[in-house]
Amino acid sequence: MDTRSDAAAAAAAPPRLALSGIKKSYGGVRAIRHADLTVAAGEVHALVGENGAGKSTLIKIIAGAERADAGRMRFDGEDVSISSTSDAIALGVQTVYQEPQLFPELSVAENVFVGRELTRRGRIDWKAEARQMAELLATVGLPEGLSAVPVGQLSIAEQQQVSIAKSLAAEASVLILDEPSAILTDSEIEVLFSVIRRLTSSGVSVIYISHRLDELFRIADTVTVMRDGRTVTTVPISELSVRQIAELMVGGLVTEGRRERPTGSTDTVLALTGASSGDRFQDVDLSVAAGEIVGVYGLIGSGAGEIAAAVYGMNPVTEGELWYDGAARRFRSPRHAKAAGISLLPANRSAQGSFAFQSIAFNITIGSLRALSRFSGWVSARRELAIADDMIRRLAIKTPSARQVISAMSGGNAQKVILARQLVETPRLLVLAEPTQGVDVGAKEEIHRIISQLADGGAAVLVTTSDLGEVLRISDRILVMREGRIAAEFGPGASQVEILAAAAGDVVAAASSPGDRAPGSEGTIS
Amino acid sequence: MTQILTRDEPPLETAVVRATIRRILPPAVTGQEWVLLGVIAVLWVILGITTPAFLTPGSLQPLLVAVSPIALIGVGMTFIILTGGIDVSVGGAIMVCAVVTAKVMVGADVPLVVAVALSIAVGAALGALNGLLIAYGRVHAIIITFGTANLFQFLGLRIFGSSTVNGIPQTLEVFGRGTAGRTFGLPHSFAITIVVVLIAWWYLRYAAGGRHLYAIGGNENAARLAGVRVRPRVMGAYTITGALVGLAACFIIAAGTSSLDQSVGAGRELAVIAAVVIGGTSILGGRGSVIGTLFGAVLVQTVLSGVTQLGWPSQLGFLFVGLFIIVAVGTDLLREKARKKK
Amino acid sequence: AGGGSTGAPSGDAGGGGGITVAFVPKLQGIPYFEAMNTGGQAAAKALGITWLYQGPTTADAAAQADIVRSYIQQGVDVLVVAPNDPDSMAPLLKEAADKGIKVATSDTDAPDSVREVFVNQATAQGIGEGLTDALMEPMGGKGKYAIVSCGETAANLNSWIDVQKKYTAEKYPQAEIVDVVYAGEDQAAATSMATDLMNAHPDLTGLVGECTSSAPGVAQAVRDAGKIGTVFTVGLGTPQSMKPYLDDGSSSAAILWNVENLGFLTAWAGQQLAEGKPFSATNKVSDDLPAVEFDSASKTLLLGPALRITSKNVDEFDY
Amino acid sequence: MTAPAPSTPSASAGAASPTTTTTTVPTQRSWGSRVISALLTQRVVLLAVLIVLLVAVMTSLDAAGALSGAYNADYLAAALISAVPLALLGLAQLIVIASGRGGIDLSVGAIVSLTGIVFGYLYGVANVPLVVAIVLTVLAGAVCGAINGILVSYIGFPALIATLATFYMYRSLALVLSGQKPISSPQIQDFYSAASAVELPLIGGALPLVPLGVFTFLLPAVVIVWVLLNKTTWGRRIYAIGTNDTAAVWAGIATRPTRASAYVISGAISSIVAVYTVAQFASARPDAGTSGNGMALPAITIAVLGGVAITGGIGRVAGIVLATVLVVWLNAGILLLVPGNEGTQMQLFALGAVLIFAALLNGLTKRRFGGI
Ligand SMILES: Nc1ncnc2c1ncn2[C@@H]1O[C@H](COP(=O)(O)OP(=O)(O)OP(=O)(O)O)[C@@H](O)[C@H]1O
Ligand SMILES: Nc1ncnc2c1ncn2[C@@H]1O[C@H](COP(=O)(O)OP(=O)(O)OP(=O)(O)O)[C@@H](O)[C@H]1O
Ligand SMILES: [Mg+2]
Ligand SMILES: [Mg+2]
């Protein structure tokens, strides 16, 4: 055979993976109405869509974690039926799931090799595993000594990297990454990208899911947009802009931009002065006045979320002072913080916020049991419903009744229910940790509106977030956290570039340093 | 298909790699096991001093014979608890295995090997039933095994047919009764138990299947996603436990008298669970060892024997067993907390 | 309250003759009560009555009460109970009597109840002394011995132990009870406790197995320890379960009574009650039971003296 | 600050339509399919149907002459006496299991034994006035429960292990303290007759004779526990920590004392069962709650059959009551249906089969219907 016919054969070669007419329902929920997906060999194929669009469900079907109700799946041109994860693994599908799927009691090395242990005469070849581990850890940028550490002792970002290492340990023809970058730092993402590039150059296909649309342009070749359980379009990414992708995702125009609102009072509600909390954050100065929204921006792991936890009494303030309403306070637990008029919307909705199989009314009122009773300790069903219905109306929560269980709600509505819990007893200080994480554009907009209204109503609001658009959009003042310290502070007019630079550690590019802060943010503490 | 990493380089056997291997190997003997060994040693020394007969073969041999069935079933129960399950039906299963075995030995006069094999087979079948319902029925193990505990008791009572089995031949003596049951002073039932414990220890440490049990207990869904065939593994754990129950039932017949009545097996499930948790296996799954279970069983029997030999009221024995559970699990908890703080 | 409490004996309970006697043992499936059942059935055939028998699967007062309640509902003529807990059975027996059912106890009494007769196998005195004498014979009237009992709270076992203690102190001053331990209904536990006792007291020369599960247990322990002839055992065991131990000398004697006869006597007493016939001071029940004494003060029928079962007469019993 | 929801593009475009279809499905379904789904997903409905079925089958068997005694209202009423301790301890399990984190109480039977001895001693031997004796007994039960609660909630023991340990300890203590002899002094005997002599005006000739204990012990306990769990903030907290312990902390709930209190209540209920048992049996037995298979395992079985989820946060008082009634009436029926030893053996089979059937049915339907 001559080289020309070889090239022709390659051009005519079937795609690595071709899905057509995929459908999947969970009970009455139609997670995937109709999906087609074609992934060529050696390409990075981005999969984007709003929360709940069906991305994770689709890749779970490819990975064998779920079975499609209908549809056809072809691998290198051959029809395949994948009915379990082992089937998929046998086909060379490796998956990094949205939530790290690891074993806390087992060591990093064991985690990486679970399900495909290297064995020699029936026993695990620890030697071979150790040898590969050294390589793998270096590849994903983790120290070699981590091999023997139980995964339960790692940070969430490290766990994500272990998940990636795990997917690299086996022979793969398709590597699926479901939002791998959500909790990684920029430098960690760089390492990930270089790994992806190396893989694709050797012919591996990568399916890459992310909500960070900008990063897709640096890594992806093709993008498939999903909306409402359907694959809307597949195009080379070079033909699109971020804005166009966003429009395809929501099926309309994106309204961005900061909501104008009156500036807050000078009545300081919360102030941290030189505050540290173990090695979570150090020497933080910040203040929030009544009617003011202060945004703390930081990548996950930067310590932004830890400030919220410390203010709410979850973690101790070990050094420095926490001033609340003019008095130095140490809240020993959320209970004490709540009693002082602080409310907090936790970052992780399912783990920290939601009482899954309880009703919406239960979920809304559980933080304010005193409000339910005329006599202390008593629950009045009438009051409970009245409070819940009021909140459902105020936050425009979509539900037929307050008696519905929260686990049957969509992500955005569930988030509103948990936000409602924080508003039952009108808080003096509202702390919001990642208020719109995992929430789609529509619900996000509503939640932002609600936050503004609360501040307009006189509440002091502290938002910690890793969403740059969000912090720019809602904050009156922006603090940027990096490595447990405040790296910079900005007024409302700051640019994306300035903030990103500060978060990434480029001090020179930052517009202002913590030293020359706006007057009035400090002096009011007596 | 492409290999992600280049694996055809010559293996570099550096000191670093060797050190890593040693560190990623699960520890052969855990801290909890050393603690238990220490406690048992201290108890034996104290009992040896206060009751001179304690450290004699005449006292230790029956102790080991009594430990054997609990430790043996404990091996299976450790597998089950490692996967995050539990089996409270072993008492009923012992009854079924024991009565079947005793009846064929008396009635059909079959050779010992056949009787033992039958007992193991019956036990495995009962265990497989548990495993089937638990792995495929999507119901928590404690509920299923509460149910099957009743069913097994029913079955056992029906086979007993409202009478005891008398005149069980002494052939089962080989499992540890009298001189015929010992080699170099070691009761055979205990020797068999040790062998089973060592095999199980090896399996849990070196075989992929064993590590999968830990993985399933740690995070069942993640194990499934990693391609571990969770349901067959879970079913296997219950089936193995059943088979060990079958063997243990033979030990129990052998340790009893020449007649067998329907009280056989009653309350054993709690004794086995006690041995497993004293041995440091986490009831939540994902952590534990069979050596610990063996030590746990020895500790419980030492306490019970010790109380009788000291001449204390025998009913005090279980007060100490309870205390030991609290102390053993408590220290484990505290060590865990200290480790987490670090 | 509706129809169930007519009090009239309903003929449909069971299959046989006109009179229905129901017996509720403490526990089903153990040779002792099953032998009583055999005796009762023999009596039913001989006397032309219907004999019902149903026991709980665990020796539990509450489970027994359920069965008694169902017999009351079935409207049996006579209800005989061997109560696990005499005090708790009393109110139920009264309820039965109120509904016109004749009530009696057998094997274990409920003294403060309305029962019309107690069918007693032997007196506590007789059993306690019988056990002591049987053990003292091989021990030569002296030495240390220990008792392996069963349920800690079993009233009859405890009353026998009391007799043994007193009787030993009075009649055998050179003998001494060093310990009483409780093994539950578990043969293996009885064996290992007996072993522990021998280890704890190297000079021990006697062991008593106080119930049908510990009697073979202590003998087995002696056999295992190779102390046949050094340590002597007696126990309250059923004949067939004791036979191997009586044969090899690890048990010197079992103290019991003819349990089948006890069942027969129970059925007979039930018939007498149902027919309204009073008991005389001495009753001829059957050829095997020519002269059963009745103590009208305590309303007790006494089967006779306790029986000493040894290797010589063990084969006379097939249970 | 009320504002109408702005109609956002995303909500109107696609996401709204599935929401409406899924949520309107239940109301559109036929009456029949709703009954079936309730039957399959709601344990209380299933139990009620099973009870009706049982009574219907037994009554027709009765009519056909297959039973050895009448399966009538009197008999069913009388059988309820064994429901009293079972249901009470089932309620205790409901509370601890619902409190989550693998909650369970294996020690209830041992607490019944131990506090029964305490009561027997106080009232029967030390001549303490009845009310004081009962109060002190309940206090003792609460202390036993508090030890469990501290171990589980404050030190972090898995409940199964903590209560297994205390089960051994309390059982042992009951035997040691009583010298393994039941206390059955004249006072205790009188207590029995006093308890049985108090006739409620309600139960005259017209109604079946329901045992008094049902009114004096069970009914008040059921009402109190129901009120506690459903009408008090404490009940809310129990369900909250059982559903999601972490979220409860973030919602400002004091999880440790709440969880510990579940065990305290469980111990207190056990001690009430102890008093009841003393009254019912006219003696305080040191093995009252531990003889045979003990009281704990049947109580847990009742709780599970009653629909209490072993993972916490789910369980209803009505489920416990119905499960108890089902088991008690089933057992009573079997005794009339199957004579001899097979009858009592068959009870074991029936209990096991019903338990597995109900659990499997729920396991199968949970995913399809999203029920509890
Ligand atoms: N196990 C399940 N049971 C019921 N509904 C489910 C289940 N898993 C997913 N869904 C629903 O299916 C739809 C698609 O979910 P999926 O997780 O695929 O979305 P996604 O695009 O990955 O969203 P995100 O960006 O938030 O990860 C959603 O409505 C979701 O609520
Ligand atoms: N785990 C689940 N179990 C059952 N139903 C679910 C589950 N998750 C979501 N649903 C249902 O699936 C439907 C679609 O969910 P999805 O998350 O796509 O909502 P959405 O339209 O994006 O809403 P929002 O804008 O509020 O996020 C909703 O009706 C929701 O109630
Ligand atoms: Mg959504
Ligand atoms: Mg997703």
Image: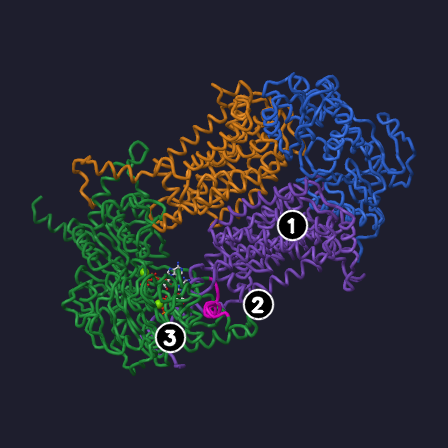
Chain colours: A green, B orange, C blue, D purple
Q: In the figure, A496 relative to C77: above or below?
A: below
Mark 1 is surrounded, within 10 Å at the Cα level, by few (under 14), some (14 to 19) or many (20 or more) other residues, namely: many
Looking at this view, name the residue that lies furthest to the bottom.
Answer: A262
Ligand 2 location (quadrant): bottom left
Circles 2 and 1, Cβ within 8 Å, touching? The answer is no
Is residue B107 visible in this depiction of the protein?
no
Real-space Cα distance between discs 2 and 1? 29 Å
Q: In the figure, A21 relative to C268: above or below?
A: below
Does mark 1 have its CB less than 8 Å from ligand 2? Answer: no
- Give the left or right position of residue D230, taking residue A491 as reference: right
- Read off the magenta span: A357-369
Give the structural element (helix, strand or loop) at label 1.
Answer: helix
Mark 2 is surrounded, within 10 Å at the Cα level, by few (under 14), some (14 to 19) or many (20 or more) other residues, namely: some
Residue D85 in the image: state x and y as whole percent: 66, 52
Residue B181 in the image: state x and y as whole percent: 52, 21
Is residue A472 visible in this depiction of the protein?
yes
Q: Residue tagged by mark 2?
A: D231
Q: Residue tagged by mark 1?
A: D115
Name the image quarter holding residue A276.
bottom left
Type of amino acid at the residue the image marks with label 3: Asp
Query: Which of these two is toward me, D361 or A331?
Result: A331
Query: Which of these two is toward me, A8 or D222?
Result: D222
Query: Which of these two is toward me, D139 or A380?
Result: D139
| Chain to which the residue tagged by mark 2 belongs | D
Circles 3 and 2, Cβ within 8 Å, touching? The answer is no
The residue under the point 27% across, 44% down is: A147
| Main secondary structure type of the part rendered in magenta | helix
Real-space Cα distance between discs 1 and 3? 52 Å
